[in-house]
Image (spheres, coloured by chain):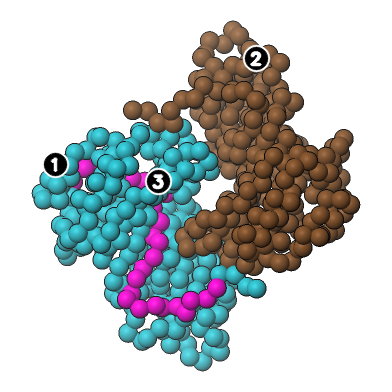
Chain colours: A brown, B cyan
Amino acid sequence: MNIALMLSYDGTDFSGWQVQRNGRTVQGEIERALSEAFSLSVRVTGSGRTDAGVHAAGQICNFPFEDTIRIAPEKIADALNVFLPPNVRALKSAAVPEPFDACRSAKKKTYRYAVYFSRREHPLLERYAARFAYGADFSEMRRCARILEGEHDFSAFSAAGSSAKTTVRTVYSATVEEEERFGVPCARIDVCGNGFLYNMVRIMAGAILGFGAGRLSEEEVRAALQTGNRELLGKTMPANGLTLLSVDYGFPLFKEGDQTSK
Amino acid sequence: MNIALMLSYDGTDFSGWQVQRNGRTVQGEIERALSEAFSLSVRVTGSGRTDAGVHAAGQICNFPFEDTIRIAPEKIADALNVFLPPNVRALKSAAVPEPFDACRSAKKKTYRYAVYFSRREHPLLERYAARFAYGADFSEMRRCARILEGEHDFSAFSAAGSSAKTTVRTVYSATVEEEERFGVPCARIDVCGNGFLYNMVRIMAGAILGFGAGRLSEEEVRAALQTGNRELLGKTMPANGLTLLSVDYGFPLFKEGDQTSK
């Protein structure tokens, strides 16, 4: 049986998704919980790696499950939560078709980059949003986001050392929403695409903010897309502002259940 | 010189505001930072205690400051932040009139109780909001909030062992706002009053939620206000959902400065 899980995690205390020699990882915690709950020693496939400090509200993974273990697939989430630490939770579980692979079957991913605008740190915002110490114009930020939408060679928006075969990606949408939290102005930059290069969303967020602050021009953004020159863009924004919101496979993996019970 | 500070803190890892023999407290951190930054050994007066696990976005405190220390009052916040841990931050500082006392001068306080509605825990919501596993009707929650507004004897809304002289308080407003975070329905219950009994906001939040879930009736809420019978109401909601938003002294303590620099 092929089981898919929807996971949420607070990335603050994790060395990212992928199992590694040193450091606590989300994949490592899921594999440990599967071993403790079901004596199952399997490799879990994630929709993609998330870096150290990056959060997820709807990460998807899958793994082979023994047909001999008698548990309803949708109850696997609850069983794993018993063995998971509070900063990772399985939100949903389901049996999926055999060929489903959380990484290779992914059609679209949506990330959120959250920012708050302040000269001083705010302890209640800092954990899930990055601080930007300059003012930024929202209509300018939206204008930059629109330039980035579409199919482009995003090599300028990728960290050095990326080993992707092609650097062409399609950004289906990049939106900038304004909100206020505890009296502090905040922005949510949501980016949906068919795939992302290493650090791509964090570099996009930096460019959108730099554009809004008047430190990056339309010419520079267009030149970065055309030439692939990473130097034209601003800094890579920090991991704490980034959250993987959802992964779309072109069909629903889970039955829609109520979030609450009566 | 009398100095007022505006503070924000993440209460998760604190044993509350007030200095105590065991455990790390916010007051203790501020007093330690004053000692390290200015060799000043003073007692800091908060607008009120916050319990273990309760957060603040705009806690106010004041303390006597040596006139011989040459620093602009509005820079004291920055100096303290150098010595404070990341989960507490001084957001603003100012010189205030001599008779100002952060506790006794307070006219109104506003608290927020944040809740998310879900059968399962969400790691990205759990830190600053309490989970409510049942559905709740927002118009019913608002109806309960309106019943609680006004001057009442709130003794039913107070934890046992409270030593307040009078249990009559005025709730100027109690509002319930709906929002969605990461696809999960959430509520923000904001309560503004001239003062609050021990655990009052957490018991009010529990009553509003219980009312919205159909587990508490209008008759029971009115009877609780009239009889002072704590048993009529539901459970005290947990500390992690509660945040002290602001304290109003009837005059502005701080010059309005921009949150960001150009």
Mark on residue B178? 3
Q: Position of residue A176 (x, y in %)?
A: 61, 52
Task: Determine the residue positioned at 40% across, 70% down.
Answer: B60
B255 drawn magenta = yes
Relative placement, left or right, of A159 versus A1 is right
Residues packed near mark 1 inside 10 Å, few (<14), some (14 to 19) or many (20 plus): few
The chain holding disc 3 is B
Q: Secondary structure at mark 2?
A: loop
The C terminus of chain A sits in image quarter: top left
Q: Amino acid at mark 1?
A: Glu
Q: In front: B244, or B191?
A: B191
Q: Furthest residue to the bottom?
A: B68
Q: Amino acid at mark 3?
A: Glu
Q: Position of residue B36 (x, y in %)?
A: 56, 75
Residue numbers of the magenta segment:
B230-258
Mark on residue A12? none
